């Protein structure tokens, strides 16, 4: 397990930061910004890096954008009883896009204040057959939902994987199901089991009364063992996404499903071990 940071800053607004990064020899990427001479600077640095202490000081001084993440080894994933399944490959937008009409078309219950969408009533509609490349899974922008190729679905059936349903992915203009992908839905939900230490930045909605927490990014998420259900797929009871107009539940996968995912070499997702207590 290795903790890392994705750092971003406008080099034109903070030239001293940029100069120091170059002096330290930190590999970085520059992205052009309108009206700027240098542009946006982004880089990734692990905490064990000897330059991390200085970079951390610079982040504090110049207010750089800093996202924490954790890398886990394949061995750690395989040895974990349960893992979080996190979509990596995003493609396309749910339809119809105009004024976010897809939300009312797809969900029955939507909180107008915090954006939590709980009960799906219709299939997601997508603009065209997705471009997946070598990926087996993908998620749509704006919607924390998971889609997979049909060969993945067949492997689930062959291995008697439990805890999922499917919805057709509807090609919007043609008004017919996709011939390449399907949506995965997860009806099994754990009992409440998130430890207080992982209830970061709680945000209780005054409209629906649901509390959302910040994304878990550092190390292993801790969860109560007796909160889990007997199912290969299940959603965490608690909601995440505080500070945004989005709400989602984390997807948990069993060890046997983890081993299937790794043995197949499926792409478009990653696995993050959790700690059961």
Image (cartoon, helix red, strand yellow):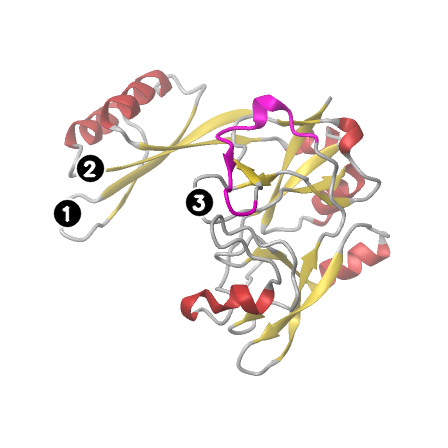
Question: Where is 177 relative to 164, above or below?
Answer: below
Question: Where, quadrant-wise, is the N terminus in this rendering?
Answer: top right
Residue for badge 3: 244
Q: Residue at x 52, y 47 (%)?
A: 207
Tell which of 105 and 172 is nearer to you. 105
Q: Residue at x 30, y 18 (%)?
A: 54
Residue for badge 1: 36
The Cα–Cα distance between marks 1 and 3, rounded to whole angstroms, is: 28 Å
Q: Residue furthest bottom?
A: 174
Local packing at callout 2 (Cα closer than 10 Å; few below 14, some 14-19, many 20+) is: many
User: Mark 1: which secondary structure?
Assistant: loop
User: Mark 2: which secondary structure?
Assistant: loop
Question: Where, quadrant-wise, is the C terminus in this rendering?
Answer: top right
Hey, which quadrant is residue 120 in on the image? bottom right
* Residue 14 pos. (x, y %): 18, 32
Question: Where is 49 relative to 66, above or below?
Answer: above
Lower sequence index among marks 1 and 2: 2
Q: Is residue 130 visible?
A: no
Magenta residues?
Answer: 193-208
* Residue 269 pos. (x, y %): 60, 47
Residue for badge 2: 11
Tell which of 39 and 217 is nearer to you. 217
The Cα–Cα distance between marks 3 and 2, rounded to whole angstroms, is: 27 Å
Circles 1 and 2, Cβ within 8 Å, touching? The answer is yes
Residue mark closest to the camera, 1 vs 3: 3
């Amino acid at each position: 397990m290795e903790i890392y940071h994705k750092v971003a800053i406008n080099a034109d607004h903070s030239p001293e930061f940029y100069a120091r990064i170059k002096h330290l020899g930190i590999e970085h990427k520059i992205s052009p910004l309108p009206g700027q001479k240098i542009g946006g600077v982004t880089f990734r640095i692990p905490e064990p890096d000897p330059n991390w202490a200085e970079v951390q000081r610079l982040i504090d001084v110049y207010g750089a954008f800093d996202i924490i993440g954790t890398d886990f080894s394949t061995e750690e994933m395989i040895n974990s009883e349960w893992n979080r399944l996190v979509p990596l490959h995003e493609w396309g937008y749910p339809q119809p896009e105009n004024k976010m009409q897809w939300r009312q078309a797809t969900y029955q219950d939507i909180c107008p204040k915090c954006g939590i969408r709980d009960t799906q009533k219709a299939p997601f509609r997508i603009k065209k057959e997705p471009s997946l490349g070598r990926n087996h899974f993908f998620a749509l922008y704006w919607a924390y939902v998971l889609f997979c190729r049909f060969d993945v679905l067949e492997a689930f059936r062959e291995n008697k994987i439990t805890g999922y349903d499917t919805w057709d992915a509807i090609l919007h203009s043609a008004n017919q199901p996709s011939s390449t992908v399907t949506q995965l839905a997860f009806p099994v939900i754990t009992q409440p089991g998130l430890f207080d230490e992982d209830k970061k930045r709680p945000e209780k909605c005054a409209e629906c009364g649901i509390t959302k927490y910040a994304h878990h990014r550092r190390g292993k998420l801790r969860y109560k063992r007796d909160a889990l259900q007997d199912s290969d797929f299940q959603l965490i009871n608690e909601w995440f996404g505080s500070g945004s107009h989005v709400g989602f539940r984390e997807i948990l996968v069993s060890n046997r499903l983890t081993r299937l995912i790794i043995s197949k070499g499926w792409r478009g997702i990653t696995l993050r071990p959790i700690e059961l207590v």
